Amino acid sequence: MGHRLSLTKLRRALSGRKKKLQEIQEPDEPYQTTPTTTKPEEGQQEEEEEEEDDDDDMNEGNTVIGLLGGGQLGRMLCEAANPLGIDIAILDEHNAPAKQAHNTNRHVVGSFKDPGRIKELAARSDYLSVEIEHVDTEVLEDIEKNGVPVEINGEIVTHRPPIHPSWRTLRLIQDKYLQKEHFKSSGKTIPIAEQIAIESGDAALDSLKKAGKQFGFPFMLKARKGSYDGRGNFKVDSEDDFAEAIKALGTLPLYAEKWAPFVKELAVMVIRTEDSDGKLKNCVAYPAVETIHEDSICTKVFMPPRDVSEDICEKARKLATEVISTLWGRGVFAVEMFLLEDASLMINEVAPRPHNSGHYTIEAVPYMSQYKAQLHAVLDLPVPDKLIPRVQSSIMLNILGGAKPDSHHHLSGLARSTYDDDMDVYLHLYNKESKPSRKIGHITLTGFCSVQELEAKAKPFIDLVDQIRLDRLEATSETLRPTQETNGSAKPAEKAPVEPATDNHVEAQELSAEAASSDKPLVLVTMGSDSDLPVLKAGLDILKEFNVPYALDITSAHRTPKYMMKVADEAAGKGIKVIIAAAGGAAHLPGMISSETPLPVIGVPVKATHLDGIDSLLSIVQMPRGVPTATVGINNSTNAALLAIRILGAFVPEYQQAMKKYQVDMEEAVIVKGTKLREGGDAAYLAGMKK
Ligand code: ADP
Ligand code: MG
């Protein structure tokens, strides 16, 4: 701070008295530092001038960091800045979480993607930084090269606030594919998953085929830009997924990544410092942590990672510093990595800012949390050359919005009321409105024991976190429940758009919420001929009993093959999760449908006029390898429906619970019969049966 003239000091030097930077009206005009030209009402003038002076006094002389984005990461940055006498000017919506935590007259209201507002922020700041990587890097480059004009007491000055991390780093990291190509060609040994760019438009399919050939299955299809919390990623299990993958992500620039069969996900925060000429000074790593993702959102962090050797943790830290040394600018960076089965490490991606996996440092490394480190690095203040936690272990639990706005109250209440000699509990609420899956706070637990012991101590917290998630998933599944039967006119499932955001700006959607809305069929029941309908009745009754919305159709493999293929092809896109297909004789329908859809298909062999249904059974059950088709007994549509419900139950807890009840009822019915038989004997039982 001391080595350069801050804006405040510059203002003073030029004007000899305090003036306030005003909002710019015209983008090309210099940024005004004199009071607005609007003439105050008589009698108000004195008062307003006084107020202005008061405002100016608020952060008198403090160095100002202009921050693009004001979510919880910015909020915690402000919390770290307050005792250090550093002023943070935030560009984000009015009353954004970070703005609430730091009182200054320098905040700017607007979008951190709006070039005009970014320049306005630059004019008010000594340095610029970000809490989100999805910003306009063109304007940052322009500010670095050409500066912004600032008018100070009638004089126009070109103001060039240093930008950290560099816009070069931000631009590179915004494109995940280029980010990893950069690591590959950096001259350092940085293991990444094999990747290939996917062509857009009509060429996408060939490109995907090439990826499948090169990587095998599954592989990961990813949006190159703007993804977060797993959105923008599509796991491709087979060629059958190509159409759906293109449908889900096809409008975006994409790349494919070889599947990383990881045993754990690790993350390392790194502080990167460089001098004012851009020469790397140092990269210092925090300890490696284990990150747990559920529903594609980071939910828990363990420091140190559980069941990972110190040697691997050291390697992770070393690798992280190598990775970050290849980038540009100062600040903290998160390095996400995979620990593979053979104990080797692979880089997943980098975030150029404080990160969810580093929240624990606030309490575990209190002398240099990731937020304090961000401030020190950006301002080129001293940072330690080693980062040793002051506790033995730490667990961070995210508080995600639950099914109801107050679902997390129990958890925050527990955090408020737990005082334990062996475990310290720190609650952080971000003052964000609770919405399902939204990151609204976190709890850090620290201890002087092993991480396993701390985990055991933290069990009531972890249980509550897990319960909030289960309740949320269950509530989401309620929206899948049918309100009325449908007749096959399913609407296509809506795909969540991929918008630029990071964890602090995201209102993540439940995976299952995408599955279907209340009136969308989840099961397609189709048959080769209407003569199969009577056989299917028992199964349809079961679906009704379990309140499963279904669609009905007739799709003959022999008489309407094109229509059959169309129905099979479109089923997944319409939100169908399971297909039941009934056919008799040369029963090709289930197998043919199975060849055209990635969905599970259950074949019901229907007994035709000849051969007792054995022909139907064998036609369905004898599918070639690679095209699985579940097959139930001849005419047993009941089991087909029950199996379909079990499949749905794997991701809709309510169906699973209903299935459990069905099984208990079935067991009880048999027990009652057994008791009756044992007690009454066979003759009486048979007599009862005859009735
Ligand atoms: P995001 O931007 O949403 O964080 P990531 O690319 O980090 O996206 O992927 C999200 C998660 O998906 C990862 O944390 C990991 O669990 C999984 N994942 C990503 N890439 C792969 C891969 N190549 N192989 C296996 N799993 C992966
Ligand atoms: Mg990630």
Image: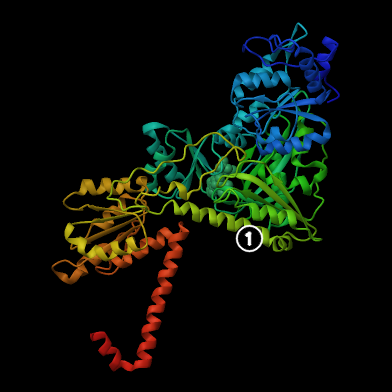
Residue at x 43% of width, y 65% of height: 658
Which corner quadrant of the image does residue 157 belong to? top right
Identify the element where label 1 is drawn.
Answer: helix
Q: Left of 79 or right of it: where is 232?
A: left
Residue 188 visible in this rendered orientation of the protein:
yes
Hey, which residue is sitting farthest front in the picture? 43
State the residue in front, 228 or 22: 22
Residue at x 16% of width, y 70% of height: 611
Q: Left of 684 or right of it: where is 242?
A: right
Q: Position of residue 408 (x, y in %)?
A: 62, 52
Residue at x 50% of width, y 56% of height: 474
Q: Quadrant of the C terminus?
A: bottom left
Q: Left of 16 or right of it: where is 93?
A: left
Q: How did the renderer colour the structure? A: rainbow
Structural crowding at the residue carrying mark 1, measured as other residues with C-alpha within 10 Å and reported as few (<14), some (14–19) or many (≥20): few
Q: Quadrant of the N terminus?
A: top right
Residue annotated with mark 1:
463
Q: Position of residue 255 (x, y in %)?
A: 49, 37
State the residue in front, 591 or 122: 122
State the residue in front, 594 or 206: 594
Which corner quadrant of the image does residue 53 belong to? top right
Q: Quadrant of ligand 1?
A: top right
As displayed, is residue 220 above or below residue 90? Answer: below
Give the total number of marks visible in the rendering. 1
Hey, which residue is sitting farthest left in the picture? 609
Residue at x 45% of width, y 54% of height: 478
Q: Position of residue 324 (x, y in %)?
A: 69, 37
Residue 394 visible in this rendered orientation of the protein:
no
